[in-house]
Image (spheres, rainbow, N blue to C red):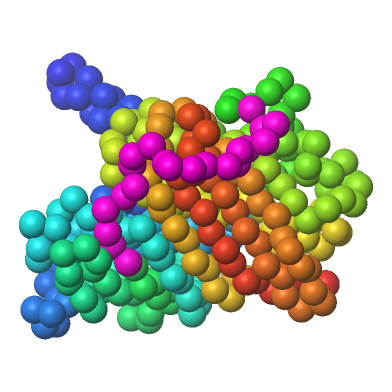
Amino acid sequence: MTTELTVDLESASELANAPFSRVCALTEVEAETPELGRYAGLIESTWTIGDKLHGGTMVAGSAAAATEWLRRIAPTQAAMFPISASTDFLGAPVPGEVEYEVRTRKLGRQIALIDASLIQDGRTLVHTAFTFSHLDDAVPQYAADHAGDMPAEPPADALAYDERNPMGKIVHVAQGSSVVIDPAWARFLAGEKSEPRLRLWIRPFAGDEQDPDVAAFFALMAADMSPPVPMNLGHFGWAPTVQLTTYLRRRPAPGWLRVIAHSREVGNRMFDEDQLVVDSTGAIVAQSRQLALIPQPR
């Protein structure tokens, strides 16, 4: 009995130390035709913003399903990984069980195209078109200074997403990772207005960071981690994403990821938001661009 209890406690500790791995853990189920792949997954309430499933997490789960499918149907292309994701949100899934349906559009030696649909209660709620290729892990021929004066680790005055920070009460993703925001850019936290730009630090838990695939999927998720930048202009509430495009450039180095977000134009109905994810070495890991609706007063 003591041995069984010890094993159960160790298993529980491992699960708690790798919560994002559960997003990426999939079970293949029977599909309607051989041309389709189908996987069962679970996205828990940890991965929500308010009561909405976090968009970047759903993209990452879909990427894991598409990767599983490619490795099954084309073992010789198993080294390929999703480098681009174009996502449309057709509905708002709730935390819990989901299914992913995947379909091959093209299978080449350099590029593969795979579509993935996130399904819940028989409805396709998120659709992502993935481009697969080989990640660009070599030292770049040219790289700008992406992070500027943003340090590789959060400074002492950075605000953790916890009970002392209102963002910690909304962004439940911070229960499955470490998230810290820069107050110098997040002026809305002090009741002030500022430019539509934000920056934060995010890091996966140790168990998730140790798995190279999970760490890469986590970086893909992190490219949608910034709060809506119009918050600095006084616009609060849910900002539904119309379309999200995400790029994964390389696998992240261990350590904190820096997320830098800004908008070029905040209109009366829509705004754009670009997010750049830089790892502890200063290399670009992921980047995204989305068009979203400005929160409207209720």
Q: Which of 114 and 136 is in front in this view?
A: 136
Residue at (28%, 62%) from the top-left corner?
132
Instruction: Note whether 283 is above or below 151 in the view shown.
Output: below
Q: Which quadrant of the structure image shows residue 42? A: bottom left
Which residue appears farthest toward the front when viewing the image? 141
Q: Is residue 211 above or below residue 121?
A: above
Q: Which range is magenta?
A: 131-151
Residue 37 belongs to the span the image colors magenta = no
- Locate residue 14, reporting x and y percent: 30, 30
For the image, the number of numbered tags is 0
In the image, taking residue 30 as reference, residue 38 lies left or right, namely right
Q: Residue at x 32, y 58 (%)?
A: 82
Q: Can residue 205 be seen in this view?
A: yes
Q: Main secondary structure of the magenta part?
A: loop
Asked whether the viewer can see residue 218, the reply is: no
Q: In which quarter of the image is residue 137?
A: top left
The quarter holding residue 1 reads top left
Q: Could you tell me which quadrant the C terminus lies in? A: bottom right
Q: In this view, does 154 lie above or below 284?
A: above
Depth check: give the residue in front, 205 or 114.
114
Relative depth, front residue between 110 and 79: 110
Classify residue 59 as left or right of residue 92.
left
In the rendered image, residue 296, in percent from the top left (x then y), is placed at 79, 73
Residue 213 at x, y percent in the picture = 29, 44
Residue plotted at (26% across, 24% down)? 10
Q: Where is residue 192 in the image (x, y as percent from the top left)?
A: 91, 47
**Which residue occupies the extreme right position in the image?**
192
